[in-house]
Each structure stands twice: as structure tokens, then as C-alpha cells.
Amino acid sequence: MMAKIAIVILSSSDTPEGRGRMVHAMTAVQELIDSGYEVKILFEGIGVTWIDAFHRADHPFTQNYGPKFEAIKPHILGACNFCTTVRFEVGDSVNAVGIDLLGEDGGRFSVGNLVVEGYQIINY
């Protein structure tokens, strides 16, 4: 049986380091999918700002990597409800992109749930 992998995006969309991490995360997701792994992606912490970036067609990262994001989008489990709606206030973008909120209303999502389901966690 192939491993189940959860990719957690924790990096900022506003830094060179964060942009590098996102490129590597999207590449890893596609490689794992192509190799037959079950992959889920979730956005936590400041990582939810990536959804806002991909929502904006004029964002330089979206112009360069938008198709790569669209290719992995079906594997997105969702975004932390608290981080999206309270902490970073990108709820409108998350809704517009069609990504589910994880966690109770205004609450957090427990990555531990994925571990219980047998997922290996990789953070970017």
C-alpha cells in the first residue's frame, strides 16, 4: 500500500523564502501524485495567504505558477478556519477559490486528525 501524505503549507506568500517553499511544495505534490501516493494539501497559519495570492490574477506568483496550482487544487483538503477568517482575514479569497474551511466556525483544524488517519505530515 502506498503511503498517505499530507502537505501542510505554513510559509508566507510575501517572502522569497516562502515563495521558494511554495514552488517546492507544489512540485512535491505533483511528484507524489504522479507516483501514486494519496496526497492532501492544507493551508495553516500564514500559509493561508497563499490562497489570496492565487485568487489574484495580477499577482506575479499566480502569473508564473497559476497552472501548477490549478493542477494540484483537487488535492486541497482545505484551510484553517481560524487562520483564514480571524488571523489573516482572507476568507473572501478562500471562498472565491472554492477551498473548504477546516475546523469549527472560527476554530482551528487539528493536524493530529490526519496522523490518526495514517497520513505522514510534510511541512512547507
Image: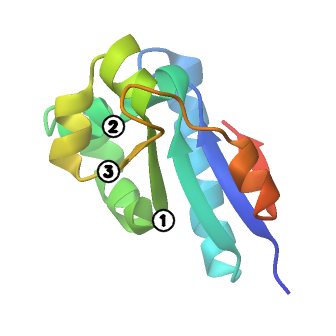
Tell me if mark 1 has few (under 14), some (14-19) or many (20+) residues whose alpha carbon lies within 10 angstroms of its own: some
Disc 2/disc 1 C-alpha distance (Å): 14 Å
Q: Quadrant of residue 3?
A: bottom right
Circles 2 and 3, Cβ within 8 Å, touching? The answer is yes
Q: Nearer the viewer, mark 1 or mark 3?
A: 3
Q: Which residue is mark 3?
A: 99
What percent of the width, then of the height, locates residue 97? 22, 48
Q: Is residue 42 visible?
A: yes
What percent of the width, then of the height, locates residue 37? 71, 76
Q: Quadrant where the C terminus lies?
A: top right
Q: Quadrant of residue 71?
A: bottom left
Q: Quadrant where the N terminus lies?
A: bottom right
Q: Which residue is mark 2?
A: 51
Disc 1/disc 3 C-alpha distance (Å): 10 Å
Disc 2/disc 3 C-alpha distance (Å): 9 Å
Circles 2 and 1, Cβ within 8 Å, touching? The answer is no
Q: Residue at x 31, y 59 (%)?
A: 67
The amino acid at mark 2 is Ile
Q: Which residue is mark 1?
A: 75
What percent of the width, then of the height, locates residue 64? 32, 44
Q: Residue at x 63, y 66 (%)?
A: 39
The amino acid at mark 3 is Ile
Q: Is residue 88 visible?
A: no
2 or 3: tag closer to the N-terminus: 2
Is 93 placed above or below 98 here?
Answer: above
- Left or right of 70? Residue 10 is right
| Residue nearer the viewer, 63 or 111 | 111
Which SS class for mark 2?
helix
What percent of the width, then of the height, locates residue 6? 68, 55
